[in-house]
Image (spheres, helix red, strand yellow):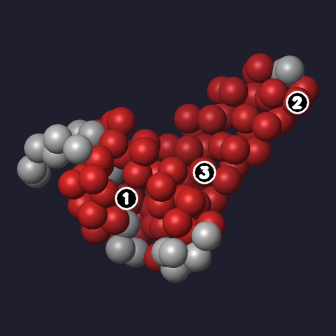
Amino acid sequence: MSRYTSFRTFYPFYLSQHANRTCRRLHFVGSWLVLMVLFTAITTTNWAWLWAVPVLGYGFAWVGHFFFEHNRPATFTYPLYSLMGDWVMFWQTLTGKLRF
């Protein structure tokens, strides 16, 4: 795997690792649930909800990679760029730039 030195060069690779539509959908659902959990934790000030953030975020994504995409999540090699990529992909899906 190449060493990426900028998010701009990393993101096309990130998208190539999410070619499977079910994988992208699972990422989207996981990210949406993370937002809902964060909203719930903040509005209720019940911080115990926060334990669910990594479980939902990574859980849905990793199911997508291991069972549908059949590849190794980029987060293992590029954790920060992958986190950024997930939210860019979420936004692009939400706005219709990427197919859901």
Q: In the rendered image, which residue does mark 1 sit on?
A: 66
Q: In screen coordinates, is 83 left or right of 53? A: left
Q: Which mark is residue 43?
A: 2
Question: Helix or strand or loop: what does disc 3 sit on?
Answer: helix
Q: CA distance from mark 1 to mark 3?
A: 18 Å
2 vs 1, front mark: 2
The residue carrying pointer 1 sits among few (fewer than 14), some (14 to 19) or many (20 or more) residues within 10 Å by Cα, namely few
Q: Is residue 93 visible?
A: yes
Question: Which residue has dot 3 on it?
Answer: 31
Which image quarter holds the C terminus?
Answer: bottom right
Residue 3 position in % (x across, y down): 11, 44
Q: Nearer the viewer, residue 32 or 94?
A: 94
Secondary structure of residue under mark 2: helix
In this orientation, which residue lies closer to the viewer: 54 or 89?
Answer: 89
- Residue 79 in the image: state x and y as whole percent: 34, 37
Q: Tell me the number on the disc at residue 8.
A: none
Which image quadrant is residue 25 in?
bottom right
Name the N-terminal-most of marks 1 and 3: 3
